[in-house]
Structure formats: C-alpha cells, structure tokens
C-alpha cells in the first residue's frame, strides 16, 4: 500500500499505535458506556497514562506538545473504536485546556494544565444559552468586574461534561451589545454559586453527559479571566471563536474515525451476505453507494489533514479550512452511519450490531461545534468577501 496521505513513517507508526491501543484498552467497553450512561473514568486514567490528555499541551506542564496533525491522526483511530473515549481525549487536546496553553497567563497554565495532563481536571466550555444558540450575540450571562474579582450571573445549556468537569471556560458578556463585549472566564465547579441544574437525556453518546449550568453570583478572582471582553469591540468574541476552531477540527477528526468504522463494518457484510444467488457486493446500486461514501470520506480526510497543518498566529487552525473540514467530516460520518444500517437490513436497527449505536452517537455532531447551516453561512460570507476584495477575480482560499 502506498503512502496516500503523504504521512511520515513516524506519523503512520503513531496511527497504528493509537488504533492498537484503542482496540486493546477501549474496544471491549465501547458499548457499555452508552448502555449504562456512565462516564468512563477508567478510560480517562488510561488516556492520562498514555500521555493522550496532554498530547498537544506544553512540555513545561507535563504535556507532549505534539502537532495538531498528530492529534488528528490519534483521535481518528480512537474514534474508530470508541467515540466516547475519543471525545474525552479531544476535549483535553483541543478544548479550553489548549486555549489556556495559547492564551492564558503563566499562572493559569501552571494551575490548570498539569491537572488536565494527569486526568484530575477536565475542562469544559459553556457558551450556548437557551436564547443564544447559533446567535451568540444574544448571550445574556454577565460578568461584573469588581476591584479584584469578577462576578458571574446567568445560565448555560447543553454543556458537554457539565456534570463531571472540574472547571469551565464560560463565555460571558462584560458589557456591550451583540458580539461586542463578549469574553471568557474560567470557573471551577466548586465555586460557590455554581449549580448543575439538570442533565439532559438524549438520543445517543450517553457515556458523556450535557448539562445546564447556573451561575448565581459566582465570584472568581480577576486572574481567572482568560479572554477579556471589551464592550466597545468584538475582539474578545473573535478570540473565543479562533480558539474554538481547535475544537471544531477535533470534531472533524473524531467524525473521520466514525465514518471509517462504519465502512469497516459495511464492507465485510456486503461481501459475505448473499441474496439473489450473489454477494450484496455484486449489486451495482450498493457498490456505487460505497464508492460515493469513500469519495466523501477521502475529501473530508484531506480537508481535515490540510486544516491541521495550518495555524493562525495563536496556534489555532484557521476558520475557513476548519469549517470546510468540520462540515465534510461530520456529514460523511452521519451518512456512513446511516448507510451501514441500511445495508445491514433489519440487523442494522438491532442492538446486536454497533451500527445503531454509532448512528445515535454521531447524530448530534452536525449540530455541535457550530451547526452545518452556520458553517455554510460563514463559508459563504468568506467566499463573497474574498471575491469582492479580489475585485472580481476568482475567489482564493488564501
Ligand atoms: C452533542 C452536542 C454537544 C454540545 N456541546 C456543547 C458544549 O460543550 N458547550 C456549549 O456551549 N454548547 C454545546 N452544544 C450546543 C451547540 O453549540 C448548539 O446546539 C449549537 O450552537 C446550535 O444552537 P441551537 O441548538 O440552540 O440551535 P438554534 O440556533 O436554535 O438553531 C436551530 C436550527 O436552525 C438552524 N439555523 C439557525 N439560524 C439559522 C439561519 N440564520 N439560517 C439557517 N439556519 C439557521 C441551525 O443551524 C439549526 O439547525 C452542543 C450540542 C451538541 C449537539
């Protein structure tokens, strides 16, 4: 087999290592977290032992400081075996802990990063509110800045790891209107006034819960401000969103793994199952669907690897390339999970096969991290802006 993605020997070795690790350590219980709805703390410990929670974090704080492409390669292989476990690694590699490593003070880095690396503190991100989903300018959770502290009041909904996270990057309004004045503050879950209001029941992905969080006069020292909001500008919001691109790209990586897992299951079934005296794989209608799926997966993978190779001044992947990758990867994952059910026939919707679980687990990911519609809107905006800036010449990605 030739080296189709032009990966180095070391990167290919890393891929194999991650896949073998996932098979040895995470495969056996991949179904259990979903069935029991319990958080896999055992896997957090294994991820920490293997250096995967601090994979992208600075060496100075115990991390491995590996590249974003390497993180993508690892997540893809973990998600191919157990999406729940991959999601935990992803939150630590790409979420608020990574944002702290790029934007936080030395004191914040020293306080939080070693805890994340050791698996003692998972840091979630709380942005969404009931009235502010896609439209973040309508956010109403407020930060009131005092002499030495910041007081937070408001409510967030559907925060991943909301019930088990040790700390949250809470996106808040420091003043202003619309996206002006938005910024982010780190709030520990043991801060007085931090309340886990409820945990949502959902279609799938039940090993990891989303929760509604309430902040009742939650007071934290000013040093906990990660991104200051300026009521006169949208600069804070822009920085929050730049950091968020790392999370978006991680979702793309996990989605590639899910799409590959669906193919891994679908291909042998098409070869083995016989109907009308021939394997299903002989039916052109099914063969071409597989070919279309592979085309979409290859496109998504190339887009994701490309975005992982690029970064802005802060070390976050760029918005345009990340939006393309996230759109393509989440959509092919959903399509592949659905196709796997279809070609399995009645088996696909039973609990005897992982196809139905995979579909339920991935269903939310075209919504999470910026919906497909919002990503299309952001891409369209950038395409038209670039076209206008280039005075009518063909739009360029750069
Ligand atoms: C699995 C999962 C995990 C999540 N984890 C987190 C988390 O950790 N932290 C967090 O803060 N949030 C989290 N979210 C919430 C997520 O960020 C929001 O669901 C998302 O931003 C969309 O907001 P909404 O669901 O309120 O949809 P709405 O904004 O109400 O939109 C509803 C639908 O309308 C579409 N729509 C809206 N406006 C337009 C328009 N102008 N044009 C075309 N279509 C439009 C949307 O794309 C969507 O399909 C998570 C969501 C999921 C599914």
Image (spheres, helix red, strand yellow):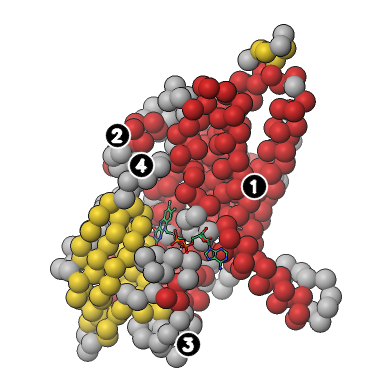
Q: Earlier in the sequence, mark 1 or mark 3?
A: 3
Instruction: Where is residue 26? Give x, y as percent.
Output: 40, 33
Q: CA distance from mark 2 to mark 1?
A: 32 Å
Q: Earlier in the sequence, mark 2 or mark 4?
A: 2
Instruction: Where is residue 72? Give x, y as percent.
Output: 54, 49
Q: Can you tell me whether the CB of the residue at mark 1 lies under 8 Å from the nearest atom of ligand 1?
A: no
For discs 2 and 1, the disc positioned in front in the rendered view: 2
Q: Image point 72% across, 8% down: which residue? A: 277
The residue that label 1 is drawn on is 301
Q: Image point 83% across, 78% down: which residue? A: 392
**Is residue 11 visible in the rendered structure shown here?**
no
Q: Image point 53% across, 59% down: which residue? A: 371
The residue that label 4 is drawn on is 206
Specify the quadrant of the image occupied by residue 372.
bottom right
Numbered disc 2: secondary structure: helix
Instruction: Where is residue 214? Give x, y as percent.
Output: 24, 66
Q: CA distance from mark 4 to mark 3?
A: 39 Å
The residue that label 3 is drawn on is 233
Residue 353 or residue 390, whichever sits in front: 353
For discs 1 and 4, the disc positioned in front in the rendered view: 4
Instruction: Where is residue 24? Give x, y as percent.
Output: 42, 29
Q: Please give the label number shown on residue 36.
A: 2
Discs 2, 1 touching: Cβ within 8 Å: no
For discs 1 and 3, the disc positioned in front in the rendered view: 3
Q: Earlier in the sequence, mark 3 or mark 2?
A: 2
Q: CA distance from mark 2 to mark 4?
A: 8 Å
Residue 53 or residue 358, whichever sits in front: 358
Q: Vertically, is 115 above or below 297?
A: below
Q: Earlier in the sequence, mark 4 or mark 3?
A: 4
Q: CA distance from mark 1 to mark 4?
A: 26 Å
Q: CA distance from mark 1 to mark 3?
A: 36 Å
């Amino acid at each position: 087999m030739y080296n189709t993605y032009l990966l180095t020997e070391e990167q290919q070795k890393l891929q194999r290592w991650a896949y073998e690790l996932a098979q040895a350590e995470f495969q056996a219980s991949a179904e259990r977290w979903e069935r029991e709805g319990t958080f896999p703390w055992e896997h957090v410990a294994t991820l920490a032992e293997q250096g995967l929670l601090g994979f992208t974090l600075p060496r100075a704080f115990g991390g491995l400081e590996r590249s974003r492409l390497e993180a993508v390669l690892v997540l893809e292989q973990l998600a191919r075996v157990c999406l729940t476990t991959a999601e935990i690694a992803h939150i630590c590699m790409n979420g608020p802990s990574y944002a702290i490593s790029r934007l936080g003070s030395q004191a914040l880095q020293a306080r939080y990063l070693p805890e994340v690396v050791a698996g003692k503190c998972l840091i979630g991100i709380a942005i969404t509110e009931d009235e502010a989903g896609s439209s973040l300018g309508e956010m109403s959770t407020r930060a009131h800045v005092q002499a030495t502290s910041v007081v937070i009041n408001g409510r967030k909904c559907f925060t991943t790891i909301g019930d088990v996270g040790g700390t949250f990057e809470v996106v808040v309004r420091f003043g202003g209107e619309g996206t002006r004045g938005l910024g982010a503050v780190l709030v520990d879950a043991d801060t007085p006034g931090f309340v886990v209001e409820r945990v949502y029941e959902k279609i799938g992905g039940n090993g990891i819960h989303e929760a509604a969080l309430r902040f009742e006069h939650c007071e934290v020292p000013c040093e906990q401000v990660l991104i200051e909001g300026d009521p006169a500008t949208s600069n804070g919001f822009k920085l929050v969103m730049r950091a968020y691109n790392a999370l978006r790209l991680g979702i793309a990586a996990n989605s590639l793994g899910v799409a590959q897992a669906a193919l891994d299951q679908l291909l042998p079934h098409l070869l083995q199952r016989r109907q009308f005296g021939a394997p299903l794989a002989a039916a052109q209608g099914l063969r071409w669907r597989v070919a279309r799926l592979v085309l979409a997966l290859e496109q998504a993978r190339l887009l994701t690897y490309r975005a992982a190779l690029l970064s802005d001044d802060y070390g976050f992947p760029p918005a345009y390339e990340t939006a393309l990758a996230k759109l393509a990867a989440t959509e092919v994952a959903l399509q592949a999970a659905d196709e796997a059910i279809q070609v399995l026939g009645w088996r696909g919707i039973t609990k005897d096969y992982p196809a139905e679980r995979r579909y339920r687990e991935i269903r939310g990911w075209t919504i999470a991290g910026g919906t497909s519609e919002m990503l299309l809107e952001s891409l369209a905006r950038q395409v038209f802006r670039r076209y206008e800036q280039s005075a009518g010449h063909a739009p360029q990605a750069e």
